[in-house]
Image (cartoon, rainbow, N blue to C red):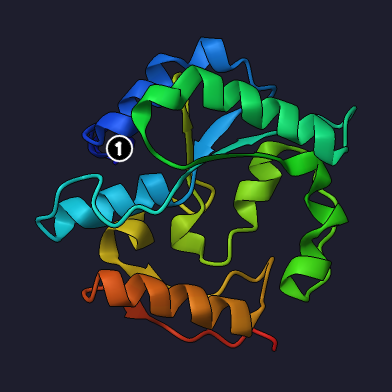
């Protein structure tokens, strides 16, 4: 299934170009993650263009030596320079500093992370916990739920209010998705 996932993700030309320029980005513990991956799969399943309905492209990296906003802005500026010709919104996020802003932004506490993959593990919906780089795919919950379109809460981030917002947004764009309630969620 990983070969299918890689082929599907790369059918989105923006994903392909980002991965083709990976070495220029030089992100420590870097991964292309989230919506640009799983939404490409859902677009293909819905018979849509691979890039349709994708709001942004997320790059996660981990730099525990620089937790500053300015350091993250510098990385973002470099990413923008390398990928400016793509004409898409690309967001670079240092996973080492998420715990410094998450609660004030989302209203829930967030433990510090140990790696980029640790951040991917905590996406609100297990089916969307995916990342890719040129040499690897990271899918800690497998890929079955992603391809089946099953949206459940993540026990690592059991925030029902945030889950409901995210699931509603996804279901509005891809009506074939199914929300399955689990008992591990908290408000």
Q: Is residue 129 left or right of residue 158?
A: left
Image height check: is 113 above or below 75? below
How many numbered discs, if any? Answer: 1
Q: Position of residue 166 (x, y in %)?
A: 49, 73
**Residue situated furthest top in the rendering:** 23
Q: Position of residue 106 (x, y in %)?
A: 72, 71
Q: Position of residue 48 (x, y in %)?
A: 13, 54
Image height check: is 69 above or below 152? above
The residue drawn where x is 69% and y is 27% is 75
Image height check: is 92 above or below 149? above
From the image, which quarter does the C terminus lie in? bottom right
Q: Is residue 29 left or right of residue 152?
A: right
Q: Position of residue 17 (x, y in %)?
A: 34, 22
Image height check: is 136 above or below 32? above
From the image, which quarter does the N terminus lie in? top left
Which quadrant of the structure image shows residue 171?
A: bottom left
Quickly name the residue at label 1.
Answer: 9
């Amino acid at each position: 299934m990983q070969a299918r996932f890689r082929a599907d993700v790369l059918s989105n030309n923006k994903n392909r170009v980002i991965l083709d320029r990976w070495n220029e980005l030089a992100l420590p513990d870097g991964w292309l993650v989230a919506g640009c991956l799983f939404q490409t799969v859902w677009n293909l399943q819905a018979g849509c263009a691979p890039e349709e309905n994708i709001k942004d492209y997320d790059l996660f990296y981990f730099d525990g030596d620089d937790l500053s906003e300015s350091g993250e802005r510098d990385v973002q500026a470099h990413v923008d320079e390398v990928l400016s010709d793509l004409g898409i919104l690309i967001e670079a996020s240092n996973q080492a500093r998420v715990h410094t802003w998450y609660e004030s932004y989302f209203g829930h506490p967030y433990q510090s992370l140990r790696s980029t993959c640790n951040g991917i593990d905590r996406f609100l919906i297990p089916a969307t916990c995916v990342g890719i780089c040129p040499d690897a795919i990271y899918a800690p919950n497998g890929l079955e739920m992603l391809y089946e379109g099953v949206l459940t809460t993540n026990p690592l981030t059991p925030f029902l209010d945030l889950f409901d917002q995210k699931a509603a947004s996804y279901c509005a764009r891809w009506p074939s998705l199914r929300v399955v309630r689990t008992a591990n969620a908290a408000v």
